Amino acid sequence: MSKFLNKKEFDNKIKQNIEYWKNSKRWKYIRVVIDELRKINPETSLEIGTEGIPLISTSDIFPYDAMQTPWSYKTRQYDCLVALQVLEHLQPKTKEAFQEMCRVAEYTIISLPYKWKRTKLKSHKGIDDKVIKKWTSGKKPYKKIIVGKKRRIILCYKNKSL
């Protein structure tokens, strides 16, 4: 596998019966996340929510319950943390989990369902700028990208040194 996941590798992983990705059009927003990762080009990374398909071949995969904070990682242990479609599932501890995401990495990239009205999952409904501001304690991303008809928002943060 190349350092960054490509479409061919993604398609091959799906064929390996990874149920989460079946019948999925997720490549559209994942490609955007990978483009942002290429710009950062992290030496170390931690991924949450990639469900067996790491975006960077050298990434560590988050093995814990993200709601159990604080996490056991050191401050700035990673160059980058990626959380795909995760934060909305960590209610009511979204704020604490987001703070940990920013604590353990120099960069944090998250994706969320954005302004979805019709969805089976209650956790995916009603996420807008106001909700995101609450979950992130008003921290402003350096980049905000909205992808696709079934909107997903990708937010990129540069975390201040401690």
Image (spheres, rainbow, N blue to C red):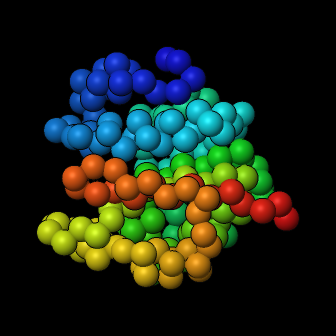
- Would you say residue 49 is visible in this rendering? yes
Whether 78 is drawn above or below 44: the answer is: below
Q: How many marks?
A: 0
The image position of residue 1, as x and y in percent, is 49, 17
Query: Residue at 72% across / 33% down in the picture?
Result: 43
Residue at 62% x, 73% y is 139
Q: Is residue 125 left or right of residue 135?
A: left
Q: Is residue 119 above or below residue 96?
A: above
| Residue plotted at (44% across, 70% down) | 90
Q: Which corner quadrant of the image does residue 142 belong to? A: bottom right
Which one is in front, 118 or 90? 118
Identify the residue at image location x=36%, y=74%.
128
Horizontally, residue 86 falls left or right of residue 21, namely right
In the drawing, does residue 69 fall left or right of residue 120?
right
Tell me which corner region of the image, top left, top right, bottom left or bottom right, holds residue 32.
top left
Residue 50: quadrant of the picture: top left
Q: How far across and how far down the image is residue 159, in percent?
A: 72, 60
Vertical comparison of 140 with 93: above or below: above
Q: Is residue 85 visible?
A: no
Which image quarter holds the C terminus? Answer: bottom right
Please state the horizontal and vertical placement of residue 98, each as a whole percent of the image: 57, 68
Query: Residue 3: x, y in percent?
Result: 57, 23
Q: Is residue 57 left or right of residue 79?
A: left
